[in-house]
Amino acid sequence: MKKFFAIAAAILISVASFAQETNRDENGNLKFGGYETNGFWDNWVVGLGWNLPTTTTTPLYIPKTLGQIGNFTEMFPGGVELFALKWIDPCYGVRFGWTGMQTVAPEEDVKKNLNYAHVDILWNICNAWWGYKEGRKFEVSPYFSLAPFMRAGKTLGAGAGAGIFADFALGTEWALFADLGGILSDGNLLGHAGDTYNYWKLELGIAKSFGKTNWTRTATTAAAAAAAIAAAKAAQDAAEAKVAGAQKTADEAQAAAKNAQDEAKQLVDEAKKAAGSNIDGLFDEPVVVYFQIGQSTLSKAEKAHAEYAIKNIIARGENVKFTLNGSADTGTGSKARNKQLSKQRAQTVYNLVDELGVSRENITVVEWDGTERFATPELNRAVIIEKQ
């Protein structure tokens, strides 16, 4: 179960780390496609703009009204644009729009209101040439346009054209846009049968994005997830090996402590056999009680061992004084930790001697000097009790 959660967490971290896409790989080279397919409601843009239109056989014809002095509508005949744009991927999009504009025939300088619906195929050259980069401020997209429905007055028509759409991001959702485009159609819309006309417009407006507004590379995400899984597995294997090593060390230490206890018991038994019931000289030598690695509390066996030795020394009826010397294994833990641990172990035995009725003035704790007294590390995790 732990392994599962470790791998799952690594995958989540890898996905989060690629939430901000750039257009460079780890070597600094441009990256292109492929991208995850967004949902239907992602990467939509709705725009509203004002246009300065004209009708001419040459681009951007300026009607006479712009040179005359009059009201604003006379000087600047204009129209509106409303569109919904869906980006299929970072390079290609489809726009559905409606344009209302005021056309001017160049010969007669006659104005007519023209409305038409159009469908545009956009190509984002910034993402196509320089790679997709989330957060890019300015983008330019040429487009090809079809106008299946055009109407001026009561006359219907159709047309096709092209243009350039540019937008400047104000954040993750809002942007300003400019659009310069033209539609080629027959002259019936202006009452000129047999002629062709270009309907030009220059638009400025504001746009709002909806849904998810960024893109994620499929290959990048897959590679990141695979790398994360491999890294998580390696980390889990290393952790399991470390736990196994620590358990082995603990088992070995416990076995060594038990062997030391068995040896001490064997010595006591042999001494009893040699001296009969008289064991007065048994406790003339220092008594050693052992602790487990990293512990400052006595096991039940070692506590019983210490109580037995201390009680027998006290039972002699002498005004016995005790010297307690705590120690630690320098092969594990830091110097500061071992010094603290040796004091805690000595304090544990101090409390035990005190509980057994020895006056505190007769108990001395010797500061540990950081040396080891025995060749076996387990034997140094101890407190030495000496009778003065």
Image: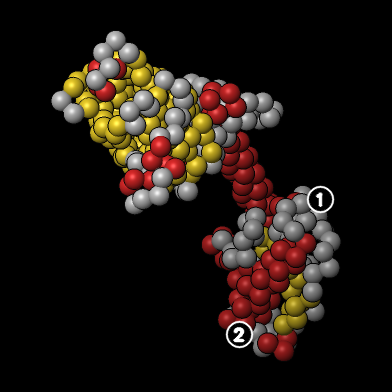
Residue 340, percent across and down? 71, 69
Closer to the camera, 149 or 385? Answer: 149
Residue at coordinates 75% horizontally, 59% vertically from top-left?
A: 334
**Which sits in the foreground, 136 or 372?**
136
Residue depicted at x 25% and y 17% = 188
Left or right, 308 with reference to 68: right
Residue 122 horizontal/vertical position (percent): 42, 24
Q: CA distance from mark 2 to mark 1?
A: 34 Å
- The residue under the point 79% across, 75% down is 366
| Quadrant (top left/top right/bottom left/bottom right) for the C terminus | bottom right
Q: Which amino acid type is shown beneath numbered disc 1?
A: Ala
**Classed neighbour count for the residue bearing mark 1: other residues with Cα under 10 Å, few (<14), some (14–19), many (≥20):** few
First-in-chain label (2 vs 1): 2
Instruction: Indicate the amino acid at tag 2.
Output: Gly
State the image quarter where residue 179 is shown.
top left
- The N terminus, quarter of image: top left
Residue 272 in view here: no
Q: In this rendered view, identify the residue nearer to me: 226 or 74.
A: 74
Left/right of residue 75 with respect to residue 328 in the rendered view: left
Q: Position of residue 306 (x, y in %)?
A: 63, 68
Find the residue positioned furthest to the top.
194
CA neighbours of label 2 inside 10 A, class few (<14), some (14 to 19), many (20+):
few
Say which residue label 2 marks.
357
Can residue 290 be seen? yes
In the rendered structure, the answer to whether residue 373 lies left or right of residue 220 reads: right
- Residue visible at 38% across and 27% down in the picture: 106
From the viewer's perspective, is residue 370 above or below residue 22? Answer: below
Instruction: Estimate the x, y position of residue 328 in percent, counting from the top left.
Output: 74, 61
Please give the residue where the numbered disc 1 appears in the rendered image. 375
Q: Secondary structure at mark 1?
A: loop
